[in-house]
Image (cartoon, rainbow, N blue to C red):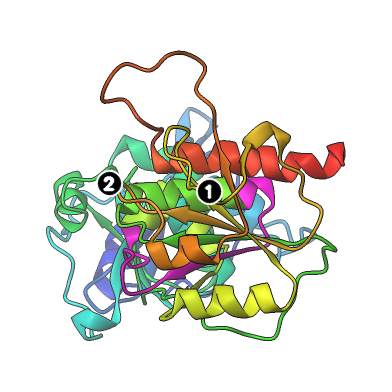
């Protein structure tokens, strides 16, 4: 208890990493001055001549102090001091509200920290038994390595931050991500595939599309910025954090980009529902498509599909045939599901070519 009172009174700044003896639990606690304190509590004591002793073996000097992973994975993230005053509500950030946003979920927070495309400001973790999970401890480890303050808050406070969305006990206050601009980097693939999104407005659909595109090997994702949803934390959560890894390129004039690529010899392929083929253009079923040249695969938004201007730039169309006679009113798949099926068929055709 003396160790706990001393730490609470003086708010010791944790500046090193000790090798914790067996039976020692450790935690990070963020105080009101935005410093991280480390409190250690022994769950076992030695017994000598019938009396308890608080002696602990000295740190193992032979162990590499730079190897933090094995030690930080033992962190229980529990506040063992009953007198420590928990913060009921996070202190306001020193940054302007339009300069940061709340990333939520284990994978988005972890990848936002490790990919370093954002500037992390503070990590909020849920207090209680749930903080013992290995996945949450890993997020805290990465925050600690990057000197990001860690603050424990209640589940209610995390719910308030995320407007009731599923946060999995972790929220990261960080600078926002935005669409990337055109650059000179080109894919090393002889037959690159760019996924071009026209008016995807549902953040859940956009996140699912990014997840499929990254997993299946799309070389670039391009999107219109005027008629599409922004890259929000909801998109990051729906993508399982892939938005933190895979950059999305934004274009104010999507038609102009497609036109330029077509002049450079790229094949422009549009997508349509099976019952709505466009006259004058060949329509190919997805399983029959072959990726044999640099290709732009155009995906239209929910409901309206591709715009008339983009359809006029297409050289061919591809569709997913239904597996049964559809009931009236059932016309197509969800756009994120359809995109995943199309990408798998198109990219797998490299092996069939």
Q: Is residue 226 left or right of residue 287?
A: left
Tags 1 and 2 touching, CB below 8 Å? no
Q: Answer whether residue 34 is visible to the viewer in this image.
A: yes
Q: How many marks?
A: 2
Disc number lying in front (1 or 2) = 1
Residue 332: x %, y % from top left:
39, 32
- Foreground residue, 328 or 234? 328
Picture quarter containing residue 245?
Answer: bottom right
Seen at 41% across and 81% down, the residue is: 252
Residue 6: x %, y % from top left:
31, 66
Q: Secondary structure at mark 2?
A: loop
Q: Which residues are magenta?
A: 214-233
Residue 30 in the magenta stretch? The answer is no
Q: Secondary structure at mark 1?
A: helix
Q: Residue tagged by mark 2?
A: 127
- Per the model, the C-alpha gap separating discs 1 and 2 is 30 Å
Seen at 41% across and 33% down, the residue is: 333
Q: Answer whether residue 2 is visible to the viewer in this image.
A: no
Crowd rating for badge 1 (residues with CA inside 10 Å; few <14, some 14–19, many 20+): many
Q: Residue tagged by mark 1?
A: 211
Instruction: Look at the image and tell me in which quarter the C terminus lies.
Output: top right
Seen at 37% across and 77% down, the residue is: 175
Picture quarter containing residue 88?
Answer: bottom left
């Amino acid at each position: 208890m003396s160790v706990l009172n001393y730490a609470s009174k003086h708010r010791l700044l944790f500046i090193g990493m000790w090798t914790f003896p067996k039976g020692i639990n450790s935690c990070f606690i963020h105080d009101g001055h935005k410093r991280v304190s480390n409190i250690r509590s022994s769950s076992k004591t030695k017994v000598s001549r019938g009396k308890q002793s608080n002696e602990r073996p000295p740190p193992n000097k032979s162990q590499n102090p730079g190897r933090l992973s094995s030690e930080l994975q033992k962190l229980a993230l529990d506040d063992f001091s009953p007198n420590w005053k928990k913060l009921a509500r996070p202190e306001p950030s020193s940054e302007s509200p339009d300069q940061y946003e709340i990333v939520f979920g284990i994978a988005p927070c972890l990848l936002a920290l490790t990919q370093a495309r954002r500037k992390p400001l503070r990590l909020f973790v849920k207090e209680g038994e749930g903080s013992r999970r290995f996945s949450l401890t890993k997020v805290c480890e990465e925050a600690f390595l990057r000197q990001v303050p860690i603050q424990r808050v209640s589940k209610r406070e995390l719910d308030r931050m995320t407007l009731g969305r599923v946060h999995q006990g972790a929220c990261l206050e960080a600078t926002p991500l935005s669409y990337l601009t055109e650059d000179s980097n080109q894919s090393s693939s002889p037959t690159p595939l760019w996924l071009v999104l026209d008016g995807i407005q549902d953040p859940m659909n956009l996140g699912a599309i990014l997840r499929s595109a990254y997993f299946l090997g799309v070389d670039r994702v391009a999107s219109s910025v005027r008629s599409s949803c922004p890259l929000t934390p909801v998109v990051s959560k729906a993508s399982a954090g892939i938005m933190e890894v895979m950059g999305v390129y934004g274009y104010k004039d999507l038609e102009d980009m497609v036109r330029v690529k077509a002049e450079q010899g790229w094949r422009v392929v549009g997508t349509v529902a099976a019952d709505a083929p466009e006259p004058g253009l060949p329509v190919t079923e997805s399983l029959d498509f072959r990726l044999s040249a640099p290709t732009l695969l155009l995906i239209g938004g929910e409901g309206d599909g591709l715009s008339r201007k983009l359809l006029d730039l297409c050289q061919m169309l591809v569709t997913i045939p239904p597996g049964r006679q559809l009931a009236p009113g059932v016309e197509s798949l969800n756009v994120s599901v359809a995109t995943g099926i199309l990408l798998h068929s198109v990219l797998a055709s490299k092996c069939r070519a």
